[in-house]
Amino acid sequence: MFLEIDQTDTLVTGQKYDFILDCIDSIVCKAALVASAQKFDVPIISAMGAGNQVDASRVRVARLDKTHHCPLAREMRTRLRKLGASLKYPVVYSDEPRRQPTAHQPVGGDHPGRPRAVNGTISYLPALFGTLLAGEVCKRLIHQIETDPRL
């Protein structure tokens, strides 16, 4: 399913989630999903940008409001403030200093659109981001079970 911003509340409330792991590339949809999850008290964690990065040792888990060197995280902070959402939620991001993006290239073929930079992602970083997302969720769920006698 391709997520549209007007579907996020329905998606979040459509069933019971222990945690939402956000790996959406679209900043508008990403921010809308986070805002909806927070609105309905569903725990969420987001992956930030891995494009044009190569240093696996620079990948971190932090609250969004504590991130640095990540343009996607900066844009998420701006969007979430506009939506009235909290910046105090966990994200996986890279604090590796950013390289210059590639020159804007025309987009053609089956996916026409405005020219844009194409910053590929090295093969191991999405896997690392996913592993850290899953690990953080496991830690939080285990902590919840250990501290809440009703579970």
Image: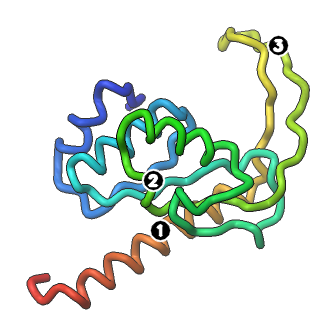
Identified by mark 1, the residue type is Ala
Q: Name the residue tied to disc 3.
A: 106
Query: CA gap, disc 3 to disc 1?
Result: 36 Å
Who is closer to the viewer here, 127 or 58?
A: 58
Name the disc covering residue 112, or none. Answer: none
Give me the residue at 44% from left, 41% from top: 80
Q: Relative to residue 45, is residue 76 depicted above or below?
A: above
Front label number (2 vs 1): 2
Residue sitting at x 49%, y 74%: 135
Q: At 74% across and 45% down in the image, what residue appears?
A: 51
Sequence-wise, the earlier of marks 2 and 1 is 2
Where residue 81 sits, quadrant-wise, is top left
Q: Which amino acid lies under the numbered mark 2 shown in the image of this protein? A: Leu
SS at badge 1? helix
Percent position of residue 33, x then y: 37, 40
Amino acid type, mark 3: Pro
**Circle 2/circle 1 CB separation < 8 Å:** no
On the rendered structure, is 75 left or right of 50? left
Q: With respect to residue 59, does 31 lie above or below?
A: above
Near mark 1 (Cα within 10 A), the count class, few <14, some 14-19 or many ≥20, is some
Quadrant placement of the C terminus: bottom left
**Residue sitting farthest toward the left:** 150
- Left or right of 25? Residue 31 is left
For the residues labelled 3 and 2, the Cα–Cα distance comes to: 35 Å
Q: Is residue 52 above or below residue 134?
A: above
Location of mark 1 (residue): 134
Query: Would residue 111 be found to the left or right of residue 98 on screen?
Result: left
Could you give the CA–CA distance between mark 2 and mark 1, rounded to whole angstroms? 20 Å
